[in-house]
Image (cartoon, rainbow, N blue to C red):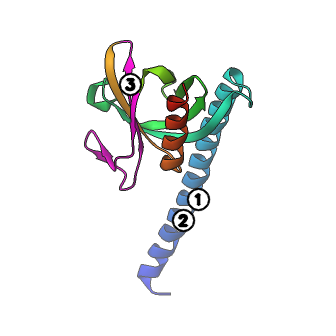
Amino acid sequence: MPGWMQIALPITIGLVVFGLLMLAFFKYVFSRVDQKLKRMVKARFSRQDMVQASGVNLIGQRSRRHGGVKGKGVLVLTRDRLWFALAVPERELTIPIGAIHAVSLPKSFMGRSIFRQMLCVRFTGPDGEDEIAWAVREPGRWRQAIELIRTSR
């Protein structure tokens, strides 16, 4: 075996093993985050209360400095509110349906882009006008469900 292969083979094997260990670690961490979010939802809502629920990624919130922390969370729509919980750092946001002014589907928010539509909600919060955006599966379906509840009030 040539000399370079005697060095390259153990390094390659080491890198593959390291990659697999990192993959297993991140899978474990994300699994724990998902479990935590499911427990948060289950503690607050019954299945009958939820119109729609989904895991989301927070893109940003206008009232937070620099848009705030991006992160993994959960979004729940009920007949009277839109509720969001961020896993790490743990925080919640409740937006009463009556406080929502507009729902849009931009491809960027506060200079952050995910190169596809995201769900953006403009609302009145405790400190005045605010706006928040999430990466969510089927943003059009979310927009339609929120608008349907808003207009039926």
The residue singled out by tag 3 in the image is: 123
**Residue 145: percent from the left, percent from the top?**
55, 39
Residue 151 visible to the viewer: yes
The residues bearing labels 3 and 2 have C-alpha atoms spaced at a distance of: 48 Å
The residues bearing labels 2 and 1 have C-alpha atoms spaced at a distance of: 6 Å
Residue 106 forms part of the magenta stretch = yes
Residue found 45% across the figure and 86% down from its top: 2
- Which stretch is magenta? 101-126
Pointer 2 and pointer 1: residues touching (CB < 8 Å)?
yes
Q: Secondary structure at mark 2?
A: helix
Residue 89 forms part of the magenta stretch = no
The residue singled out by tag 1 in the image is: 20
**Residue 101: percent from the left, percent from the top?**
38, 28
Nearest the viewer among 153 and 122 is 153
Residue lying furthest front in this view?
152
Q: Secondary structure at mark 1?
A: helix
